[in-house]
Amino acid sequence: MKNKKNTTIIAGIVFVVAVAVILIVNASGAGNFAGSFWAMVPPLVAIALALITKEAYSSLFMGVILGAIMAGGCSFYGTVDMVTVDGLSTSVADNAGILIFLVILGTIVALVNKSGASRAFGKWAETHIKTKTGAALATFLLGVLIFIDDYFNCLTVGSVMSPVTDSKKISRVKLAYLIDATAAPVCMIAPISSWAAAVSGCVESESYSGIELFIRAIPYNFYSIFTLVFIIVLSVLNFDYGKMRKFEKRAENGGDLGALKLSDEEERTLRVDGPENPNKGKLIDLILPIIVLIVLCVWGLLYNGYQSIGEGTFIEAFSETDAYVGLPWGSIIALVLIIIYMVARKVMSFEEAMECLPKGFIAMVPAITILTLATSLKSMTNALDASGFVGAAMENAQGLQWLLPAIVFVVACLVSFATGTSWGTFGILIPIVSAIFPETSSLFFVGISACLAGAVCGDHCSPISDTTIMSSAGAHCNHINHVETQLPYALTVAGISFVCYLIAGLFNKINLTWVSIPAGIVLVVAVLFYMKGRVAKEAD
């Protein structure tokens, strides 16, 4: 209790000092915050406060306030206007589609639980998944199969796999890592996903369509590819390192999985019991809703794309879609069909199905709150023209062609980490990267890939990232614990990816850029074998 009080005091001091410095700089006449390093201060302070306090809500809100003070000209009314209008209100309005999508997903998860399908899957898993390694690989496989959208991935995989991983004594933070590491990385290398559509919309090329450029950049998206290899090898070797090891040992020895503790009232509010007759719920009641949701979400994205272009190919429609419209389109139709199916199957009554609607919403409130605050913080960063600062930094590095892919990767990592958004990062950097690398250069695709990979990496590490937040929500674990335990793993893959971008730049001169791909896979395996030996030696 005393440590918690001390961290709160330290966080308060950090915030007050940051406000004081901003006001002093503004009073001195040097308060031209836009397009400078000051644009990165609000997210950096929010991240620091989150790591100090291990509490996301207040940390994000303080970051929003700092950004609003600078963007609002250090006046009281300007600050309040920025927080309420440009921040929170705009965040809710801009993300209304995704917020609706989250509530629908929460409701579908509640329906599946209510039907007894999760229980049926647990019984199936007990028969077919015998080991801890098997549970981890099954979680990985499900994450790979749900490639359409990272939010959908996080919430579905967490809900379906938590009973299985719990039974094999895998901690909730390890589950959160498995979810997070197969959400954005999979979406970023899947041509049919909301991420592919978002990237395609950011590309302006005379020679390639957006989706064509995205597909040709996939082989060099080292962080995404190597993360998937990392999970497979780590699961097969069956060990952990860093802070994750402590949580895994606690789960294995004492059974404390690290799931969030709920009050009695919260338990009563969020609990969704299965049917009175447990045999009503079958495995098909889990599989069919997921298939229906995926198919209709793909249809929703395509329908929206065709609305934009009128006529065209499948690929063109997908490149022009708006995920914030297409996903709610598909998911709300899926919800209606799933309710009809559940009632027709007589696994629940219509009244019981309707009870799942508010419960699904309540289950998503923490994630929606953090997402709203994180997006508000991004709005403050945009108002301070962070892209101008990043663009100037990138242009200063143009003389080092062979180093540029690695530099792009690092810059994208830092921007994504500080802002908590992959989409915002590649939206800022892709136009700059496209200008740096000529389209005739073989490094053009490598540079685009480095930008996308860095965006995923920074997003993966950032405590204010929406995907990281969704992963914590999906695994139902402490958010900061999730960030701290996955950081060593993410940084390991990031280091290997950086080396591979250096290799790609060097070997580009002799047209052997592809050598970096097998080199990276070998490095992942070698590093993990080394870490396993080191952990075994420490245990002795």
Image (cartoon, helix red, strand yellow):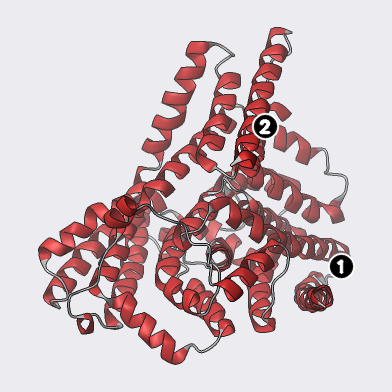
Residue at image mark 2: 10
Q: Nearer the viewer, residue 322 or 284?
A: 284
Give percent across and percent down for residue 188.
57, 62
- For residue 334, say whether it is visible: yes
Q: Which mark is residue 507?
A: 1
Q: Is residue 385 above or below residue 487?
A: above
Pick the front one: 12 or 95: 12
Q: How many neighbours does mark 2 have within 10 angstroms: few (below 14), some (14-19), or many (20 or more)?
A: some
| Residue 116, position as x, y percentages in the image | 26, 76
Which quadrant of the figure has residue 395?
top right
Q: Is 382 left, or right, of 406 in this rendering?
A: left
Q: Residue at x 63, y 79 (%)?
A: 235
Amino acid residing under circle 1: Phe
Q: CA distance from mark 2 to mark 1?
A: 49 Å
Q: Measured along the vertical axis of the image, is residue 183 above or below residue 43?
A: below
Horizontal side, residue 508 vs residue 219: left or right: right
Left or right, 297 with respect to 143, comes to left
Which quarter shows the C terminus?
bottom right
Q: Which of the 4 image quadrants contains residue 249?
A: bottom right
Residue 66 lies in quadrant = top right
